[in-house]
Image (cartoon, helix red, strand yellow):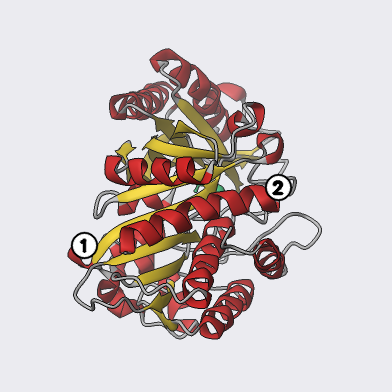
Amino acid sequence: MLTKLERIQKDIEALSAFNDTKGEGLTRFSLTEADRGARDYLKSEMKKIGATVYEDAAGNLFGRLQGTDSKAPMIMIGSHFDSVKNGGNFDGPAGVVMGLEILRVLKENDIALKNTVECVALIEEEGGRFGGGLYGSRAMKGLVTAEALEASLDSAGISMAKALNAFGFDAARIGEAKRNPETIKAFIELHIEQGPVLENEKLDVGIVGKIVGIRQIKVRVYGRPDHAGTTPMPMRKDALVSAAEVIASVPGFALAVGDGTVATVGTLSVLPGAANIVPSEVTFTVDIRSKNAQSVEAVHKAIEEKLKALEAVRGIAFDVKTLLSVEPTQLSETIISSLKASADELGISYKDMPSGAGHDAMIMASMVDTGLIFVPSKDGRSHCKEEWTDYDALQKGIEVICHTVIEMGR
Ligand code: HGY
Ligand code: MN
Ligand code: MN
């Protein structure tokens, strides 16, 4: 093995310390002090390797090892380093550490590749702070506008534009983060599986073919605030009762389309939020995923139909905003076969797998040849403090990508 287990472990443990909910899982939202701590750690490690370190206008962080042929397109490797609220230490950082460790291996073994290799640490993949997500990769595709940055607010009402500027970036220049796909030969991500398959089947890595399509919508139901004691039931325009009826229908809509479609209501807020006031405004999100785009569309449509029906009989109003919408994505067969060849060469077991989770790879795949491998998650758990991947299992995944990068860049 060219990679070093102790360095991989040290990176994960060091990054895990930059956390705003110590003892309650990992919370590292983008453009916060926890982000800055992790960012500075990554910069110092990249500099130790002798990589050129830079950040793009979107706040993504890169460490570059120049290839021998400056005209050859680069190989980009990495993942995101923000987290969900009270999440785990491996979701995202496992892939960033893969990039860091491969730069170290190239440097210390004097492996001079034709292609430049860039390790990337992407921000706001989860959308935990500003909603939506896949932000760093979407900015590289040129999909993020200054207006969108102004409109994306965190729970304190701070816009992503303001947060970027406060961090030393310039939100108005977000367009400069757009990459020319011709300059990138491949994007390869490593991620924890976040499910039980690899552990149950005692396999080392998953080689991802298709990533589900994802749509995240924010639904607001508007009623009328009234006194909880003096307002007769037939007179009420209770936003929460109507929202609850829609929310209770969501699982049925997903099951009705079948083919593994899933839908989740993960957030809910009630205004004014007092025990003795009939709720006037309720906001909730629905995260819809399927390997078939038309199934995602069908669930979204069913939710809107239900809202319209309630509007007609209950006198409530509503609006629906799409926070994120990405089609199901097929990853590159070329990269998939290279990853398989590397795993075979290294005697590392693998299987073809779909991804039920979204990843930056799904955005990058619409620009360049993209690959994604999974490493096992203990008990299949993720997005919780129990999230865990054995370091030797992570190392095997890194070895597969390291071998592929070296073969690709020779
Ligand atoms: O939601 C997801 O699938 C990913 O964790 N952002
Ligand atoms: Mn995640
Ligand atoms: Mn992730």
Q: Position of residue 75 (x, y in %)?
A: 33, 64
In this rendering, the answer to whether 283 lies above or below 13 is above
Identify which residue, 16 or 36, lies in the foreground: 16
| Residue at image location 46% in from the left, 54% down from the top | 401
User: Badge 1 is on which residue?
Assistant: 181
Q: Quadrant of residue 231?
A: top right
Q: Is residue 308 visible to the viewer in this orientation of the structure?
A: yes
Identify which residue, 94 or 409, lies in the foreground: 409
Quadrant including the N terminus: bottom right
User: Badge 2 is on which residue?
Assistant: 388
Q: Amino acid at mark 2?
A: Trp
Q: Position of residue 93 (x, y in %)?
A: 58, 60
Q: Measure the C-alpha gap from mark 2 to mark 1.
A: 34 Å
Q: Position of residue 87 (x, y in %)?
A: 66, 52
Identify which residue, 376 or 156, lies in the foreground: 376
In this rendering, the answer to whether 143 lies above or below 199 is below
| Residue at image location 57% in from the left, 34% down from the top | 240
Q: Amino acid at mark 1?
A: Pro
Q: Quadrant of residue 27?
A: bottom right
